[in-house]
Image (spheres, rainbow, N blue to C red):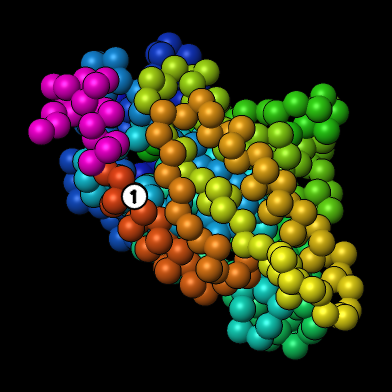
Amino acid sequence: MWLLDGETTIPPYLPELSNLVRRDFKLSLSEPAEHQGRQLQRGFERIIHFLRGVEIGIALGGAARGMAHLGVLKELEEHGIYVDLIAGTSAGASAGTSAGTSAGASAGAMTGTLYASGMDVEYTIQSFKRDLTLPWFFRMLPGGGYWYLVYKYRRGKFDPMLRKYLGEARLEQLPIPMLTVTVDLVSGGPVVREAGDATRGILESINLPGLSSPIMGDGEALVDGGLVNNIPADVLVSKGCNFVMASSVTAKLERDFVGIRAGQTPQKQKAPSVLKVIMRGHLVQSFNMNSVGVQPADFVIEPDVTAFDLAEFERADEMAAVGQRTTSDLVKTIKKQLAKLDKDLFPFD
């Protein structure tokens, strides 16, 4: 049990101690530092869960518009539902095409890790909006958002962007245990990270094929985990969680692609760019894999974010609000299910 002060959010890395215990907990009696949420202050609840044999996990699915996950996590916390383990996968990158829009990658691996690190939800949202806004040069280019996304991937710009917040923190040091899922092109199977550099864990999981090169090392070639596991609820079950929630932003798909709408006679128009086809392909893949990924989950939360363009990170706060409203409508049902797991810990009238 790590008891941290108000300024320290990450404990020292001492692997010789970690090897002696089944699980460690991080908690604080102090008020959160600036830009920090109350994840450490809720460490006591997680200890109680552990002692009573309760393990609540949440799987954060891939694809763009993943800012909705932050609203889901915030609403659960506000209603006293504290998750013990988070698993996230994929980037579901997005890119803008018009001036003033933004580009980047979000969804499960990135939003989940930043939340697990103790960052305040509202601060995280504003940071995304600031960090992923297109520079003026790319706003001047046709399809500039897509080229900006390629630029950020190929020039390694996501690493310094994330290290501003995570530093050299490791996954096993975070206040909430975090699992990131990636895919190894060598073995053809998923790779689950529960230890090691937190930033690298995100980078591996959001590494979109077609936009970036595989991350190489230790006989592996790693790319976006959403290729084989868009919503890693099964990973949480395998880790011992006995109540698993899934937050999915890919349950619904807008029937529109570059102005072509389902059921309508297409107008003669210019063929979409290769980058647009790649991005749409990732979204369609995530949509079709959604029903598979959520199967192991005990409860599924599906914010409808189809009203948002894939590029609209400047509307991150609105997407989070959708996630929060969707979760608010489901809280009573979630608590009713938790009461079946432990009626004393989760009383339900």
x, y percentage for residue 145?
72, 74
Secondary structure beneath dot 1 equals: helix
Q: Quadrant of residue 219?
A: top right
Closer to us: 175 or 253: 253
Residue at horizontal 29 percent and vertical 51 percent from the top: 329
Callout 1 amino acid: Thr
Residue found at the very far top of the displayed protein: 20
Closer to us: 276 or 49: 276
x, y percentage for residue 252?
57, 53
Which quarter of the rendered picture does the N terminus lie within? top left
Is residue 345 found inside the magenta-colored segment of the image?
Answer: yes
In the picture, measured across the screen, residue 98 lies left or right of residue 278, that is left
x, y percentage for residue 39?
31, 43
Q: Looking at the image, is 64 positioned above or below residue 52?
A: below
Residue at horizontal 48 percent and vertical 67 percent from the top: 316
x, y percentage for residue 187?
82, 24
In the picture, measured across the screen, residue 345 lies left or right of residue 248, that is left
Residue identifier under label 1: 327
Residue found at the very far left of the displayed protein: 349
Residue 20: in sight, yes or no?
yes
Dot 1 alpha-carbon crowd within 10 angstroms: few under 14, some 14 to 19, many 20 or more: many
In the picture, measured across the screen, residue 13 lies left or right of residue 162, that is left
Q: Quadrant of residue 194?
A: top right
Q: Looking at the image, is 7 positioned above or below residue 26?
A: below
Q: Looking at the image, is 134 positioned above or below residue 203?
A: below
Residue at horizontal 67 percent and vertical 58 percent from the top: 93
Is residue 341 found inside the magenta-colored segment of the image?
Answer: yes
Q: Quadrant of residue 266?
A: bottom right
Which quarter of the rendered picture does the C terminus lie within? top left
Q: Looking at the image, is 32 positioned above or below residue 317?
A: above
Q: Which residues are magenta?
A: 332-349
Tag count: 1
